[in-house]
Image: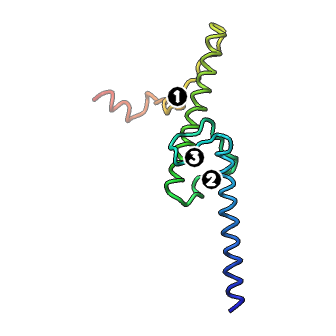
Amino acid sequence: MAKSGDKSSSSGKKSLKRKAAAEERLEAVFAGDGATESEGQPPKAATFPPGFSISEIKNKQRRHLMFTRWKQQQRKEKLAAKKKLKKEREALGDKAPPKPVPKTIDNQRVYDETTVDPNDEEVMFEVLN
């Protein structure tokens, strides 16, 4: 019986280590910003560590909160990049590089010119009818 208790405590230690590691990652995310979940305000600058996976968070409310913060951070980064490009364009004026053309199905299409032999019997039949 003592061995089974040891096994459960060792697996319990592993799960505690995982939980502690996840909590450390969360604390690293929130370190220094002073915001908590109870305040309901997003942090001023939440930087997520590399390798951080929101799907590892088991608490649904915390996972949702972290996901919304992550999305806000992504939006802010995208907006900052757009503003930077816009300022560069205004500063360069006419010398600014052209705006990139978005890739669409029509833009990527390789045109095939089909040629038909005018002496072909089917073509002659279509022309006559």
Q: Quadrant of the N terminus?
A: bottom right
Question: In which quadrant of the rendered view does residue 74 lie?
Answer: top right
The image shows residue 123 at horizontal and vertical percentages of: 38, 31
| Residue positioned 53% across, 59% down in the render | 59
Front-lying residue, 129 or 36: 36
Residue 66 horizontal side relative to residue 27, left or right:
left
Residue 116 horizontal side relative to residue 28, left or right:
left
Circle 2 residues within 10 Å: few <14, some 14–19, many ≥20: few
- Return the disc, 3 or 2, that comes first in the chain's sequence: 3
Q: Amino acid at mark 3?
A: Thr
Q: Report if the CB atoms under discs 3 and 1 are less than 8 Å apart.
A: no
Q: Report if the CB atoms under discs 1 and 2 are less than 8 Å apart.
A: no
Q: Considering the numbered disc 1 on the image, is that residue within a helix, a strand or a loop?
A: helix
Q: Which residue is mark 3?
A: 36
Residue 9 horizontal side relative to residue 74, left or right:
right
| Residue positioned 27% across, 29% down in the render | 129
Q: Which residue is mark 1?
A: 107
Q: Nearer the viewer, mark 3 or mark 1?
A: 3
